[in-house]
């Protein structure tokens, strides 16, 4: 089976670079547990990216695993998050929006008190109340690439799986 997806590793590296450029030293990775394959890949890549850039991830990376999905999960994670965290990368934009609102309920604002980056670039992230930094996932382009592969795979079903990784920006 062929698959087409965003470049989760490149996205995680971009997030790590941005948080480090912003001066962050204590990081958080926010994801739903259990996660999707893409979410797990983003988290693993984020940890690797921080580590290769000199961060002691054992001491300076907190894993925030919420039990609920989406906005509710982000809200839940914010209620339990260590206030010392400076840079948080979220597996998706809905988690990031919930986390941001949860931190606001605690009297903390981004970017004054912490940095926050989401993934997916959903329309909500651009709304005035969020204006969230997020990695763009071009769903239409991913769908076009997946559809373009179907006729070839139908004609030649036996070759091994071929991944197609898109760009992250």
Image (cartoon, rainbow, N blue to C red):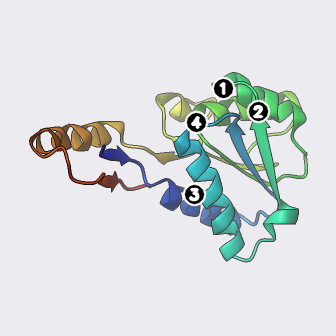
| Mark nearer the N terminus (3 vs 4) | 3
Which residue is under mark 2? 66
| Mark nearer the N terminus (4 vs 2) | 2
**Which residue appears farthest toward the left when viewing the image?**
155
Left or right: where 20 falls relative to 159: right
Residue 33: in sight, yes or no? yes
Mark seen at residue 12: 3
Tell whether label 4 touches label 3 (CB within 8 Å): no
Mark seen at residue 93: 4
| Mark nearer the N terminus (1 vs 4) | 1
Please provide percent x and percent y for residue 120. 49, 40
122 or 49, nearer to the observer: 49
Residue depicted at x 12% and y 46% = 156
Category of crowding for the residue at label 4, using alpha-carbon neighbours closer than 10 angstroms: few (below 14), some (14–19), many (at least 20): many
Category of crowding for the residue at label 1, using alpha-carbon neighbours closer than 10 angstroms: few (below 14), some (14–19), many (at least 20): some
Residue depicted at x 75% and y 66% = 23
Q: Quadrant of the C terminus?
A: bottom left
Tell whether label 3 touches label 1 (CB within 8 Å): no
Q: CA distance from mark 3 to mark 4?
A: 14 Å
Disc 2 secondary structure class: strand
Category of crowding for the residue at label 2, using alpha-carbon neighbours closer than 10 angstroms: few (below 14), some (14–19), many (at least 20): many
Residue 119: in sight, yes or no? no
User: Residue 118 is drawn in which quadrant?
Assistant: top right
Which residue is under mark 1? 69
Residue depicted at x 63% and y 26% = 70
Please provide percent x and percent y for residue 2. 30, 46
């Amino acid at each position: 089976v062929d698959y087409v997806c965003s470049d989760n590793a490149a996205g995680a590296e971009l997030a790590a670079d941005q948080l480090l450029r912003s001066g962050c030293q204590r990081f958080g990775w926010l994801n739903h547990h259990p996660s999707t394959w893409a979410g797990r890949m983003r988290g693993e890549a984020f940890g690797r990216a921080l580590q290769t850039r000199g961060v002691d991830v054992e001491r300076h990376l907190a894993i925030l695993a919420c039990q609920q999905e989406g906005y509710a999960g982000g809200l839940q994670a914010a209620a339990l998050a260590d206030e010392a965290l400076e840079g948080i990368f979220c597996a998706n934009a809905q988690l990031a929006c919930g986390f941001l609102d949860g931190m606001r309920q605690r009297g903390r604002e981004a970017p004054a008190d912490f940095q926050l980056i989401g993934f997916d670039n959903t329309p909500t992230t651009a709304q005035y109340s969020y204006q969230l930094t997020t990695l763009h996932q071009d769903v239409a382009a991913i769908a076009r690439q997946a559809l373009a592969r179907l006729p070839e795979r139908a004609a030649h079903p036996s070759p091994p799986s071929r991944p197609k990784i898109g760009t992250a920006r």
